[in-house]
Image (tube, rainbow, N blue to C red):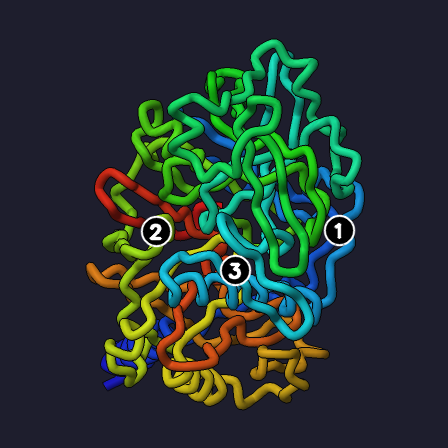
């Protein structure tokens, strides 16, 4: 009998261990544990956490207000300011889609909505550094998947807004070449006419802000070994309005004027980016296909006839804590869904958001609630906590591509659920940049697919 005790003890131990391991595994599917300190980013740049592992063009992405940014003024706006600007962009994108890309003159109660080409400047958070001209002049620009036109401010520009770097002076560049009014290129562009026989453009904003300049060719330097000759861009000479110090913008949309389309013969119409989890680290922008696509989860890139430049996807389901929410897929298809690098907070149909919020709250009942911040209505007070357990949140796209969001893509640094409801059920849904954090998002215009790779930066 004595010899049997160790045997039964071993069986009991294995049984308990098995039960514990199974339970722990289920909890791993339901929760993410994050340090409370991660909600309070520091002021020291930690640099890149990963390298893209490719021989293609690789540019560092930084958050404009983070310690890795080259900006001299890195003061972060309040969440009230961030959400106000974000809503301006959302209103513009949704109205543009609903009206089929027609020129818009829509007024927000506090800030006007931009019209014509492009997007609401001032909402983009992520920047890269590139070079224009010969000799090369460094310029810090926004990146934006919701725009096609690439532009920078040029000297002379007495009424231009204040920017981080000196104005680009085309007269000092041997490779600068303005497009003439009678050229084929000018006739194919959304031109406003001629100025001194040069092809002009004007991008107008609802509050009177605008960007005016000359369509031109110039040498674009992405890296020392990646130089693009005769790159078409807007050289701005009269730019005024709601801008935030960058030297210009690089459009990453699907239209002919975008960086992606202009370099498609070199990089195959494929690019990717990874937005960092925190402003204290960096991400990357890569032109060309990733070296390893085996871990990519892919979904079809859909096209909206009225807005062919936008990146539409098929969002079909949402899961919280490993459980798919009871939301009919038709709820998501009513207004359509786009991926957008410039929108911050993801916007969902009211029914879908209500289900997400309810499920999220049920998993967070152990934490005291905190006051709402604007549209962020599900907030918590994590004072005194060293670690925080939050439920997993996954987005499922057509093609069976399910992405489990990083913790930084679920909670804002203000302690709020980083999702919001659209104003009506038929409005455009937008997957914002918070939910894209730490994923390499791969856009392949040739195969018309979008891929996601976890923990890429």
Q: Nearer the viewer, residue 436 or 323?
A: 436
Query: Is 297 positioned to the left or the right of 239 in the image?
Result: left
Residue bearing the label numbered 2: 452
Query: Is 269 positioned to the left or the right of 90 in the image?
Result: left
| Residue 122 place in picture, x, y as percent | 64, 53
Tag nearer the camera, 1 or 3: 3
For marks 3 and 2, the one nearer the N-term is 3
Residue bearing the label numbered 3: 343
The image quarter in which residue 18 lies = bottom left
Query: Is 247 positioned to the left or the right of 365 in the image?
Result: right
Question: Dots 1 and 3: beta carbons under 8 Å?
Answer: no
Q: CA distance from mark 3 to mark 2?
A: 18 Å
State the residue at coordinates (55%, 70%). 411
SS category of the residue bearing label 3? loop
Q: CA distance from mark 1 to mark 3?
A: 24 Å
State the residue at coordinates (61%, 81%). 379
The image quarter in which residue 159 lies = top right
Relative to residue 2, is residue 286 depicted above or below? above
Q: Is residue 13 visible?
A: no
Mark seen at residue 2: none
């Amino acid at each position: 009998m004595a010899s049997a005790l160790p045997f039964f003890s071993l069986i009991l131990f294995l049984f308990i261990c098995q039960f514990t391991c199974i339970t722990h595994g289920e909890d791993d599917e339901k929760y993410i544990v994050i340090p409370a300190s991660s909600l309070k980013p520091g002021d020291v740049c930690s640099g890149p956490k990963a390298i893209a592992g490719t021989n293609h063009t690789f540019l560092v992405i930084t958050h404009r207000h983070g310690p890795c940014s080259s900006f001299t003024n890195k003061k972060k706006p309040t969440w009230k300011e961030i959400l106000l600007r974000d809503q301006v962009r959302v209103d513009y994108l949704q109205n543009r889609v609903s009206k089929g890309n027609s020129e818009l003159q829509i007024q927000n109660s506090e800030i006007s909505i931009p019209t014509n080409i492009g997007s609401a400047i001032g909402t983009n958070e992520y920047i890269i550094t590139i070079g224009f001209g010969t000799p090369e002049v460094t310029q810090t620009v926004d990146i934006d998947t919701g725009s096609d036109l690439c532009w920078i401010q040029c000297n002379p520009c007495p009424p231009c807004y204040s920017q981080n770097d000196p104005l680009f002076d085309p007269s000092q560049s041997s490779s600068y070449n303005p497009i003439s009014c009678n050229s084929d290129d000018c006739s194919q562009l959304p031109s406003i006419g001629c100025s001194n026989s040069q092809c002009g453009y004007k991008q107008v904003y609802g509050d009177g802000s605008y960007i005016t300049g000359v369509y031109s060719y110039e040498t674009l330097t992405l890296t020392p070994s990646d130089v693009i000759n005769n790159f078409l861009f807007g050289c701005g000479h009269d730019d005024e309005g709601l801008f935030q110090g960058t030297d210009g913008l690089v459009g990453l949309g699907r239209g002919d004027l975008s960086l992606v389309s202009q370099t498609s013969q070199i990089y195959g119409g494929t690019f990717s980016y990874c937005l960092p989890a925190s402003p204290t680290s960096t991400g990357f922008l890569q032109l060309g296909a990733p070296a390893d696509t085996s871990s990519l989860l892919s979904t079809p890139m859909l096209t909206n006839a009225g807005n062919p430049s936008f990146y539409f996807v098929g969002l079909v389901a949402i899961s919280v804590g490993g459980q798919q929410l009871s939301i009919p897929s038709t709820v998501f298809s009513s207004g359509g869904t786009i991926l957008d690098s410039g929108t911050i907070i993801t916007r969902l149909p009211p029914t879908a958001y209500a289900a997400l919020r309810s499920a999220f709250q049920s998993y967070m009942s152990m934490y005291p609630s905190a006051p709402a911040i604007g549209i962020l209505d599900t907030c918590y007070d994590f004072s005194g906590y060293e670690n925080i357990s939050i439920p997993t949140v996954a987005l499922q796209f057509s093609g069976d591509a399910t992405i489990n969001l990083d913790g930084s893509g679920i909670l804002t640094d203000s302690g709020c659920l980083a999702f919001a409801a659209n104003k009506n059920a038929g409005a455009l849904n937008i997957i914002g940049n918070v939910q894209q954090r730490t994923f390499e998002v791969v856009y392949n215009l040739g195969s018309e697919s979008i891929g996601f790779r976890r923990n890429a930066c």
